[in-house]
Image (cartoon, coloured by chain):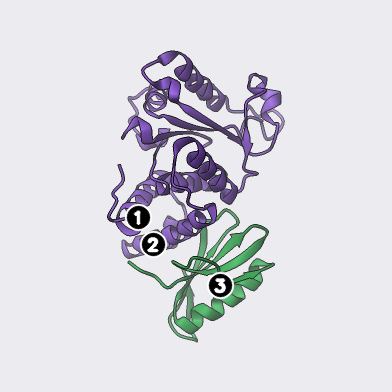
Chain colours: A green, B purple
Amino acid sequence: MSSNSQHVVPNGDKWSVRKTGASRASAVFNTRREAIERAREIARNQQAMLFIHGKDGRIKERIVFQNDADPSKG
Amino acid sequence: MSFEKSVFINCPFDNEFKPILQAMLFCIIYLGFEPRIALERADSSEVRIEKIRGLIEAAKYSIHDLSRSRAKKKGEYYRLNIPFELGVDYGCRQYFGHGRQQKKILILQETSYRHQISLSDLSGCDVDTHSGKFEIAIRKVRNWLVNEAGAEAIGASRIEGKYIDFQDWDYLRQIAAGFSDADIQDYPTKELLESMKIWVSTVERPQNKLI
């Protein structure tokens, strides 16, 4: 099962946006909110799933972008 | 499961510690070792200390996390099982024979020097800290396995990235199997441990099956 999901993950004192399987983050932000905004944008454009992780590294929220008007929370 | 590849983990099993334990489990499996924890079997007829003794004797490597060696609030007892089991492990290495003198022990805790108050017998021993952060726990376990157990020197950041990839795969697999988000985010450790083994052996390294 392969995935093109986007993840918002802790990165030291910062937050990163990282695609599943990527060797590094595509962007790093000072705040979780900024990282979520960017990841939402990417996931929406790619009709991909967005996973938002907590400080403990585990997935806390899943958002599915089926079309522009209908993001649904998991 | 071979003695040479087994890593006994003696740590708190409370919800607050669960993310650290699960990150350590992933790191151990990813580096090709077999974690052994008391949660792996749930036979009520088995006496707990006997189960622990068996795990200690069967593992060349042990990780003991003393993060709960202090009560959190006034009147609360702190948990003595973990330092007790560290003592059993130490005794096994000293007295058991049959190759157990090769056993290697990593002692972790959340903050520096806390053990020196409640467990002063450990003065002079190296005790490492993870500050309650999963990524630091991964790094400490990775460094120890590379240096003491000859694990492949894969960077801690890559292991952390693979942990994200594993969670992605596991989450989608569970959704497909009919689990709700709430079910999945409960993260039962025993099931997650089995999923980690499956992911490493079928997705990450299908050509190189685990022990």
Query: Residue at the location (45% across, 32% down)?
Result: B61
Relative to B181, is A27 above or below?
Answer: below
Q: Give the residue number, with chain letter if any, for mark 3.
A: A26
Secondary structure of the residue carrying numbered label 2: helix
Q: Nearer the viewer, residue B115 or A27?
A: A27
Instruction: State the mark number for residue B199.
Output: 1
Q: Nearer the viewer, mark 2 or mark 3?
A: 3
* Mark 2 vs 1, N-terminal side: 2
Query: Residue at the location (56% across, 24% down)?
Result: B83
* Same subunit, tags 2 and 1: yes
Q: Nearer the viewer, residue A51 or B203?
A: B203
Quarter holding the N terminus of chain B?
top left
Query: Residue at the location (48% across, 51% down)?
Result: B154
Q: Quadrant of residue B106 in the image?
A: top right
Q: What is the C-alpha distance between the residues marked 3 and 1?
A: 24 Å
Query: Residue at the location (64% across, 57% down)?
Result: A12
Q: Amino acid at mark 1?
A: Trp
* Same subunit, tags 2 and 3: no
Relative to A73, is A13 above or below?
Answer: above
Q: Give the residue number, with chain letter if any, for mark 2.
A: B169
Q: Are marks 3 and 1 in contact (CB under 8 Å)?
A: no
Q: Position of residue B71 (x, y in %)?
A: 66, 31
| Residue, far bottom | A68
Q: Position of residue B112 (x, y in %)?
A: 69, 35
Q: Nearer the viewer, residue A71 or A3?
A: A3
Q: Are marks 2 and 3 in contact (CB under 8 Å)?
A: no
Secondary structure of the residue carrying numbered label 3: loop
Q: Nearer the viewer, residue B50 or B125?
A: B125
* Same subunit, tags 3 and 1: no
- Label 1: chain? B
Q: Amino acid at mark 3?
A: Ser
